[in-house]
Amino acid sequence: MRMLFKQRVFSWFDSYDIYDESMNTLFTVKGQLSFGHHLNIYDRNGYNIGAVVQKVFAFMPKFELYFGGSYGGCVRKELALFKNNYVVDYNGWSVKGDIMGWDYSIFDINGVRVASISKRLMNWSDTYSIDVDSPYNALPTLMIVLAIDAEKCSNN
């Protein structure tokens, strides 16, 4: 399953639209006013199905993942020299690849690739292509991509 992740160009808060290959809306992401990033995720029918919330008073950047209001895990940046490392606390998943260049993959606990992410260059706004192994993994993958994007944008 391929998803296209596009940031809205003119928006006061973080806002994104996520499309399938036929350009049908799968998810809409809307930021809200808060300390740090607070991104609410809505399905194609407008139902709030999750959130990515930055924990502001953490030593290293940390984002909690909520599925339907219930805590599901977190993504946190790890201290490393000359590269970005992220630790994912969700189903034993891990992130590997060229995160600095925006091309990386997400792997499950057995080392099987769950998703691959690549940033599309030469666009007006942040645009990513996300290939997910299963529609079941689309939402958690999107949440991880949102957390990494928010952390990187905070440092620019």
Image (cartoon, rainbow, N blue to C red):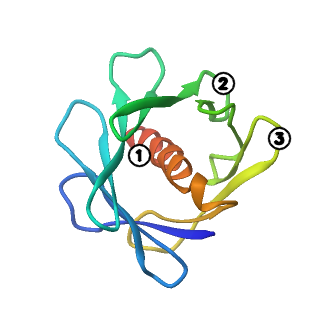
Residue drawn where x is 65% and y is 60% of the image: 134
- Going from the N terminus, do you reach mark 3 or mark 2 first? 2
Q: In the picture shown, does residue 9 fall above or below 42?
A: below
What residue does disc 1 label?
153
What residue does disc 3 label?
111
Q: In the picture shown, does residue 7 fall above or below 77?
A: below
- Left or right position of 75 against 55: right
**Disc 3 crowd, CA 10 A, few/some/many (<14, 14-19, 20+):** few
Q: Quadrant of residue 26?
A: bottom left
Q: Quadrant of residue 10?
A: bottom left
Viewer-closest of 18 and 99: 18
Amino acid type, callout 2: Ala
What residue does disc 2 label?
80
Query: Disc 2 and disc 1: Cα gap in Å?
Result: 18 Å
Viewer-closest of 50 and 18: 50
Query: Disc 1 and disc 3: Cα gap in Å?
Result: 28 Å
Residue 59: % across, % down? 45, 14
Quarter of the image for the N terminus: give it: bottom right
Residue 29: % across, % down? 33, 56
